[in-house]
Structure formats: C-alpha cells, structure tokens
Amino acid sequence: MLALLVATTVASLVYNVATRHRDRFRYRGPAVTVDGTRLAYERWGTHGSPIVLLGGFVEPTWVWHAAAPLLARDHRVFAVDLPPFGFSQRRGPYTLEHWTQLVRGFDVRLHLRRPVVVGHSLGAAVAVSVAGASSGIVLLDGDALPGGGPGWLSNLLLPPWSTTAYRIATGSDWLFRRVLRNAWGNDPPSIGDATLDAWQEPFRMPGTAAAFKAMLGHGIQGVSTRALRRVRVPRLVVWGADDSVDSPSAGRATARAMHARFVSIPRAGHLSMLAAPAAVARAIDEFAARARS
C-alpha cells in the first residue's frame, strides 16, 4: 500500500508539472472592477430598460448567448460572471453575501437603475438577495434555497491528487458532453467543439482549482424560505418542464412561498435558456414590461 501511495503521488506530481500550462488562460473581454474584484461581463442592446443576467454553478456568461440577443431588442442586457465562475477574477470569499455585494456594485458602476434581475440555478439566490434594489426578479430553474451541501468535501481535496483530478475532469470532452446533455433536456443537440471550449476555458483561469476548493467549504448556498416570503418587488419563477437537475416541484414550492407566477417551459431541461431561448426570453420580456409599468 505504501508503494502504491508513493507511485500514485509521483505520477500525480509528474502529470501536474506536464500540464501546468493549462492554468494560464487570459481573458481579454469586457470587465469592470467592483470592490477590488474584476468582474467579467457581456452586454447586448443599446436602448430600453436594463436586465441583469446571473448564471448558476460553473456557468459562464456564454449560457445566455441565445436568449440575451432576443431580450436586447427592447432592453439593455448585461450578463455577469459570478466568481469563481466564468472569467471573473478568482478573488473570494465565494459566498452569497459577497456575490450580492458584487452585483449591487456592478449595477452602480454601470449606472443601472433598478434593473430586472434574472438568476439561473445558484444565481436565483443572488437575485432574491438583490431584490430590494431591482424593479423585479426572475428565478430561472433555481429555487434559491440552500442545499446543505458537501462542505466537508473540501477537506478531502488534498494536493497533488486534487490538482490531477481537477485537470483530468475539466479537460475531459466526454464528461462535459455527458453533463451538458443531461442538463439540456430530453432532446439535446450535438455538443460541438465551440460549445466545449465555451465551458472548458473558464476552468483554465489561474487560481480556479483553489477557488473551487474554497467555495465548496461553504456548501450549497441559498436564502431562507422566510426571505422568499419577504420579497415585495414583482417576481416570477420560470422552469424547464424536463429539468432533471432541479425538480419543477421545487420551483413551484418557491413560487408559492413568494406568491409568484410559475411558468413552465416545454421541452427544456435545467439549461432552459439554451434548450428554449425564445420561450425563456419571451417570459422574461413580458415580465419586465409588467414590472416596469
């Protein structure tokens, strides 16, 4: 056993040295510094009321590339990478409280007055947390509640093996294709190289592995049911009818707690904005019109 431990450790160290170039990706897109953190974002549209889009766990702003241009016909649309996801700077703490501060600061820096905030999956909790500074919130495939979560898992991520496992997993096209197809819905498209690059490149940002370990120590974060009941701004819950990651029943329960309307998106899974971008954009657009009236 000792010989096996030594052999695997040496192999891990050799692999880590051979793949050290993988963690040197440099983002050169639009970004703004908020509270000392460089936030990457994308923007669509030149006129109309503002909409801020927040992705979920490990989701880059790319997830909005199909729905956002549809919303941009009548709105100024901004998608923000919540660190340590996407291309934002790996600077913690990676907590709901800090994400909330960053989104509020982002709105101030870009002079967005009471935007409609859309939070997908994990981002739903952030949308609820910033509700008071918005004109309305949309929870997309996210019930905003904490999931307990494997906070203890971060204690098992020991170097050098954790680095090796991280690089193997985040470099596996097979794994990414499988996860994306499961999250897309019952009729996923062919996952091409461009789509894989959009998901894999953020994992090559410097400091990502350490950031994920730090974030896992907090478990799956969310707000309380009491916080849901206190939301007073207009609110809407939208859910992929075929979501197998987060059950539609969880979305309906959150909608009841918030006294919010629930919209089911046919033939869409957890990544409803990719599976049915037109239907998702239409639901958000109609809600934004009512919230602003």
Image (cartoon, rainbow, N blue to C red):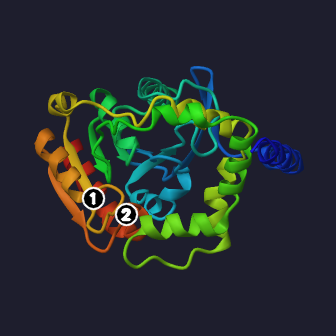
The spot of residue 184 in percent (x, y) is 43, 68
Q: Is residue 41 visible?
A: yes
Q: Secondary structure at mark 1?
A: strand
For the residue marked with disc 1, what is the amino acid?
A: Trp
The spot of residue 221 in percent (x, y) is 38, 34
| Position of residue 142 in the picture relative to residue 154 (left or right) | left
Q: Nearer the viewer, residue 32 or 230?
A: 230
Q: Is residue 195 visible?
A: no
Q: Secondary structure at mark 2?
A: helix
Residue sitting at x 49%, y 78%: 189
Identify the residue under disc 1: 239
Q: Nearer the viewer, residue 145 or 107?
A: 145
For the residue marked with disc 2, what is the amino acid?
A: Ser
Residue 96 vs 61, above or below: the answer is above
| Position of residue 135 in the picture relative to residue 2 (left or right) | left
Q: CA distance from mark 1 to mark 2?
A: 7 Å
Q: Which mark is residue 272?
A: 2
Residue sitting at x 43%, y 64%: 183
